[in-house]
Amino acid sequence: MNYKKIIKSKELRFKILSWLEFIPDKVMVRLQYWIKTGKILNLKHPKRFNEKIQWYKLFYRDPLMTKCADKYRVREYVASKGYEEILIPLCGAYDCAEEIDFDKLPDEFVLKTTNGSHTNIICRNKKKLNIRDTVNTLNSWLKQKSVKLGREWAYYNIEPKIVCEQFLKDSQDVNSELKDYKFLCFDGEVKYIWVDVNRSTNHKRNFYDVSWNYLEVESDVPSYGDNIEKPEGLKKMLEIAQRLSEEFPHVRVDLYWVNNKVYFGELTFYLLSGYESFYPDNFDYVLGREFNLPEVKTKV
């Protein structure tokens, strides 16, 4: 079922989800899984990666996940692991958009909220930024804290804030978008890597193993083809991803390689909310075999 064609407005979809917050998580997760994948969710004996993500949402509740899902507080976690140097320089943190003094910000920066996904504003020229629209957008994102969306537990208790980070750019090609390296980690080991390119223009995605062998795998985003060079910093990024993931049964560690330096992006526990389609479909099972569900179902 292509629900996005039926309800084209993202805002309306969010409203509907907010109206349905009273439905228990376990019921809503089963319903959303069926709507978004067309499959019946198996929680008793999950085998697919997507099924295990749903189990993860419902039964594994470690407070450290909430801290690390928070785009501001995760910085403390990264520093505690000895990697403060990979944090993108912070321009400021705010409780509401009215606190931002845009006159003091650099010409290029990134604004994001701590409590959401895809809630980023990239400014490459402050003179062209519509400040009123920016303030309204940021405040509307902050108010989304009560909407459970995909029933992703780790995000439930994040204190909504706005963070402003330095804008990263490649000195060799200042106009190009950065490649986003995402490391799929299980029990502290990196098993697969995906790379997103041209996120805002012609989004493509490649999958690799840890030796940078290209995999004939696609998701809802088409492949870029086997023509992305192995980054010089791959070994360092693998080391960092392994260290940052060692506390969790599964997490995706997002990193950048810019100007011969590693930068931290974020930690993601519920990969694409557990509704991603893989081609071939068997890759869903391949990832599922790597995901060993913990014996202890809850830590709270």
Image (spheres, rainbow, N blue to C red):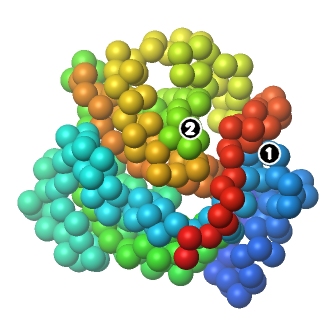
Quarter of the figure that contains the C terminus = bottom right
Q: Residue at x 18, y 62 (%)?
A: 92
Q: Percent x, y for residue 27?
A: 81, 75
- Amino acid of disc 2: Leu
Looking at the rendered structure, the secondary structure element under dot 2 is: strand
In this rendering, the answer to whether 27 lies above or below 204 is: below
Q: Percent x, y for residue 171?
A: 21, 23
Residue designated by label 2: 184
Q: Quadrant of residue 262?
A: top left
Is residue 188 visible from the viewing direction of this image? Answer: yes
Q: Nearer the viewer, residue 198 or 152?
A: 152
In this rendering, the answer to whether 29 lies above or below 145 is: above
Q: Nearer the viewer, residue 203 or 249?
A: 249
Q: Report whether 250 appears left or right of 17.
A: left
Quarter of the figure that contains the N terminus = bottom right
Q: Report whether 267 appears left or right of 283.
A: left
Residue designated by label 1: 48
Is residue 87 visible from the viewing direction of this image? Answer: no
Q: Report whether 132 appears left or right of 119.
A: left
Crowd around label 1: few <14 · some 14–19 · many ≥20 (10 Å): many
Q: Quadrant of residue 297?
A: bottom right
Q: Quadrant of residue 177?
A: top left
Q: Residue at x 27, y 52 (%)?
A: 80
Looking at the rendered structure, the secondary structure element under dot 1 is: loop
Give how far apart the Cα atoms at labels 1 and 2 are. 15 Å
- Amino acid of disc 1: Arg
Q: Residue at x 33, y 42 (%)?
A: 264
